[in-house]
Amino acid sequence: MSTTTHETPTPVPARRRPGLKARHLHFIALGSAIGTGLFYGSAGAIQAAGPSVLLVYLLGGAVVYFMLRALGEMAVRMPISGSFAEYTRRFLGPWAGYITGWMFAFEMLIVCLADLTAIAIYMRFWFPETSQWIWVALTLLVVGAANLASVRWFGELEFVFTIVKVTAVVAMILGGAAILVLGLGAADGGNPLTRLTADGGFFPHGVGGMISAFILVLFAFGGTEIIGVAGTEAEEPSRAIPRAINTVPVRILLFYVLAIGVILLINPWRTITGEQSPFVQIFDTLGVSWAAAALNLVVITAALSAINADLFGAGRVVAGMARERLAPQALSRTVQGVPIVTTIAMLGVLVVGVVLNAALPEAVFTIVASLATFATVFVWLMILLAQLASRRGMTRAQRAALEFPVPLWPYGQLFAVAFIAFTFGIMVWHPEYHTALLVGLVFLGGMSLLYVATGRHLLAR
């Protein structure tokens, strides 16, 4: 690796410029944590950990918060295109910036492939006779047009998608509260709190079961780092980024811990088998006959939102890398701030990837989730290490002048780093994650070889 560099950033005054408004960034921050990982992946996490999955969401949420605060500190200080790929390049060296950016792009494309295939499958609910490729093509046209048009169009589309997702989760929580308070659909009439300790206790599979749920839970939180990328496109980054990131604890408590808690209080955890979404079971308990159709619309919206945001984030990061000569220079070309070449290239990869994804077995969700988790936590780790390195290069006066310093320094950051290292250990421990671990390591090694073979290690010095 190249020698660590500590570049003094040019002060960037708060400014207003065309781009994402504060409401766009708030909804991107909100929507980035609500996707298929919550609506479907939560069932697998519940089966693995039982009621103790609530602790897993709290621990995972704490890691996400400290990671985002690290990213926020750097983004407010240096709101630059390229976001965390550029920060890791500056504070950890050229290789770190190169591999972080490509790992993030890899993560985003993997998740997009899963979501594209999921949308095509979900549309069969209403149009069973329509060929799958038609829905894939239409999806790519919609999100591709939104990402190619302008930053504002991306923000507006994500705004609408997030409203649908948030409304669904809030409706589930309110419906669940009605069941608990009024006793609607309660078969045993007993105290709902006993469901958290009955049938094996709070840790039915022991601490090991709780630990095994970490992968699916972190997959659900994957993509939250897009806040840092979107924040640099905001009209006033120094104000918009802190406001968006500071809502993270509330979002995690509301949309994950409270939502999953309501599900576990109503349905015994063993009944949540994954044959249908836990959210469907809530609507079924309420006796809502159109629950399946309603949820189908929500998960399609969640998948569309994920693809939309993932293309946006990956496009900006890769274009920023290209400007630093860590990617082909053609990928840096922008039109009105939109990385046209990068976005088109990624859309092309997705067209090819969907064809390959269609041939995979039904277990593809777990494989993709674990593979995306490897890439996700790797990027998070690099963000945390970059922020730690940036602090070492500051004077006492510079630290005191930080507008958005991380809380509980340095203990919160060290906790997050240790948790991520532990997550990699889980992937080594559990055989079902070995394939994802191997693919992630091969990608890491292959891109590192390309870094040297293409001479980018010389260009980036």
Image (cartoon, helix red, strand yellow):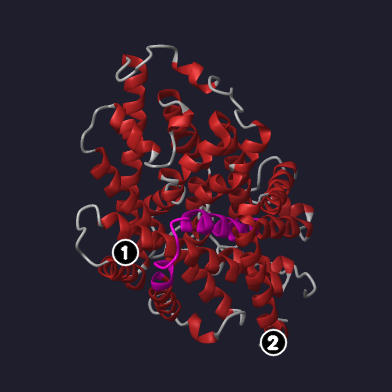
Q: Secondary structure at mark 1?
A: helix
Q: Percent from the top left, x then y, of residue 204?
A: 60, 28
According to the picture, the residue beneath numbered tag 1 turns out to be: 153
Mark 2: amino acid? Ala
Closer-to-camera residue (397/164): 164
Asked if residue 181 can be seen in this view, the reply is yes
Q: Quadrant of residue 121?
A: bottom left
Question: Is 255 left, or right, of 155 in this rendering?
Answer: right
Quick check: 438 above or below 23? below
Q: Is residue 189 magenta?
A: no
Q: Is residue 355 magenta?
A: yes
Quick check: 88 above or below 301? below
Closer-to-camera residue (321/171): 171
Mark 1: amino acid? Trp
The count of marks equals: 2
Identify the residue shown where x is 33% and y is 37%: 280
Q: Percent from the top left, x then y, of residue 452?
A: 71, 83
Q: Which residues are magenta?
A: 354-380
Identify the residue shown where x is 38% and y is 75%: 351
Q: Secondary structure at mark 2?
A: helix
Q: Earlier in the sequence, mark 2 or mark 1?
A: 1
According to the picture, the residue beneath numbered tag 2 turns out to be: 453
| Disc assigned to residue 262 | none
**Closer to the camera: disc 2 or disc 1?**
2
Closer-to-camera residue (40/458): 40
The quadrant of the image that shows the N terminus is bottom right
How far, Cα to Cα, is label 2 from label 1?
A: 39 Å
Identify the residue shown where x is 30% and y is 20%: 185
Identify the residue shown where x is 25% and y is 57%: 124
